[in-house]
Image (spheres, helix red, strand yellow):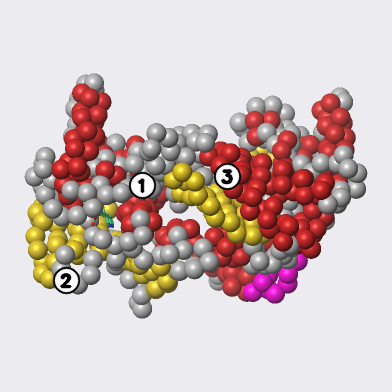
Amino acid sequence: MRNSTEIDKEISASTKVEAEYTGKKIRTLSGLEAVRERPAMYIGSTSERGLHHLVYEVLDNSIDEALAGYCTDIQVFIHPDNSITVKDNGRGIPVDNTVKEKKPAVEVIMTVLHAGGKFGDGAYKVSGGLHGVGVTCVNALSEHLEVEVKRDGKCYGIAFTRGKTTTPLYVKGSAEGSGTSVTFKPDSEIFTELVYKYDTLRHRVRELAFLNKNVAITITDERPSPPLQERFHFAGGIVEYVQQQNENKDLINPQPIYLEGQKDTGTDGNKNIIIVEAALQYTDTTYENIFTFVNNINTEEGGTHLSGFRKALTGVLNNYAKKKGLLKDKDDTLSGEDVRVGLTAVLSLKIPNPQFESQTKIKLGNAEVMPLVESLVSDALNEYLEENPAIAKKIIDNAMLASRARIAAKKARDLIRRKNALGSGGLPGKLSDCQSRNKEETEIYLVEGDSAGGSAKQGRDRRFQAILPLRGKILNVEKARLDKMLSSEEIRNMITAFGCGISDDFDIEKRRYDKIIIMTDADVDGAHIRTLLLTFFYRYMQDLIKEGHVFIAQPPLYLVRSGKEHRYAYSDEELQTVLDEVGREKNPYVQRYKGLGEMNPEQLWETTMDPAGRTILQVQLEDGEKADRIFNILMGEKVEPRRQFIQENAHKVRNLDL
Ligand code: 0RA
């Protein structure tokens, strides 16, 4: 344990930097005032995301304590008033006085920006926050925050309001064991959203439990009665993560390949220990799913660790296939894409000083990490292949199949591209394009069936609305490989009409429309076509969904006529309201639309296509991992999980939330 003097030196070093920086500003704010003045700068947002971020910040401290090897149990409580408690059985935040402030360390940690990381080992401290300001920000942005520390046989308490100490440290009584408990209530003056979402917190807690196998995390929601409680502890860590992710898929290697290694990359006697962990499992699916984490942060944009991992995979599998004579032609090579088809993997690094490249902190930049990950993964993978020749052969066969499909798909794609290069833009004959070429204002309706397509074409505003009718079922891309997929005319028509390519060729800037609107019948077939389309977009044009370009049209279910008046109802409840309003005694005429084809062009425009009156649902992709599982369940081979999912979610089908 380090003493207070050491801690104090580091704090003064950090506050000096702070002072120099703020000194240049016209107006000088103390640290916590700055946080309250510009909260979004510190926690990203003051809406739902930021609200949940507060919990992650506090949780991170307990996880750090677990990483240091001192904490095995963490509990998260959502209290009835939407305040939160995070409690751990670690060493407890130090309470002795610092030399400089002559205040308890716990108070300094909670009130001085950047102080937290300076205490203790802090080796793996990477706050989820943008500037590593962590729990101090949570304090500044809380109406009330209370810390309880158990240490040295005593229980201590200290409390704050909006970052200011209101109850200085005092001894509450005696206590056994050690630990820290932080309770806070987000400030209603700061946050626009104050209600915690159980599922959001549960997701992060579960993820942290996968990534840190030595710690059990319990989450309790005290708002419902009886309270909701779940405990997450995965002794298998990321291996279990991969297994859950592949739950409903057919497996090539039933037991995931697991590797773990560490290396000190420090120089001049300074320690810089990097820990690498990976779990890999191949399935018979046609896409890759690699999740990467650095210090428990999801590096969604990858970075040097992912590059090293990919290099290892491509190199090792090619060498192995050549050495064992598994390739058809000895000059064949498997591309990176080929060897990743069907792969689900988790790569998790713990690294003392990560450098994140992008603003959003989700891409790792440390150059030394790439060769390190490459060599660790190569060694482990080589060893695995040598020890499991039968599975190794299956993995190579899978990659060779992907390779053939890739070459066939390239031919098909080149053909589409060549057609595009020829006059008339090569647009599909079935497309009724719009006049405007300004992609910020244009829309394309994907319409089920030729007859509804005809009505839509007549009813639209041709200046900015394009219509592409889709006939019958489009191909289930979840099951088909790329070459087969591109042999489907409906799919090719969409690709050419959208103009932005697919997969590796995808370029969102080249898209020809701002909104892609799926308009299908309000029945089971319509829902099926919609799911097929969404699967296609999700797998091959994901950014269209991520950036909010995909929508679902909402045609009415009923037409109510009464005298000269006509009204539409979009749900069964709304039908009742409309009937109440027009009066039932006059015997209104009610028509239930069985399909879009029953509406004439004017009706279709008025109810579903006119931007002034229509409702369209934006498809959101909040959680890629969940979406992947849902698509796999809905569109994959296995019947039982699908039946179960549909039964459990039947009430939600009107608004499929990815
Ligand atoms: C600084 C030093 C030590 C522990 C902690 C911080 C600590 C912080 C938090 C925050 C939540 N839970 C926590 N648990 C521990 C080490 C003190 C020692 O050496 O005993």
Q: Is residue 207 above or below residue 136?
A: below
Residue at the spot 51% in from the left edge and 63% down from the top edge = 237
Quick check: which quadrant has ligand 1? bottom left
Q: Considering only order in the chain, which callout, 2 or 3, is on the residue closer to the N terminus?
A: 2
Q: CA distance from mark 3 to mark 1?
A: 20 Å
Closer to us: 414 or 245:
245
User: Would residue 404 appear left or right of 253 to someone viewing this image?
Assistant: right
Looking at the rendered structure, the secondary structure element under dot 1 is loop
Residue 447 visible at all = no
* Residue indicated by mark 3: 373
What span is in magenta? Answer: 634-644
Residue at the spot 32% in from the left edge and 53% down from the top edge = 61
Looking at the rendered structure, the secondary structure element under dot 3 is helix
- What label sits on residue 123 in the rendered view? 1
Question: Mark 2: which amino acid?
Answer: Ala
- What label sits on residue 175 in the rendered view? 2
Question: Mark 3: which amino acid?
Answer: Val
Q: CA distance from mark 3 to mark 2?
A: 45 Å
Badge 3 vs badge 2, beta-carbon distance below 8 Å: no
Callout count? 3
Q: Considering only order in the chain, which callout, 1 or 3, is on the residue closer to the N terminus?
A: 1
The picture places residue 30, in percent across and down from the top left corner, at 18, 34
User: In terms of image quadrants, where is residue 473?
Assistant: bottom right
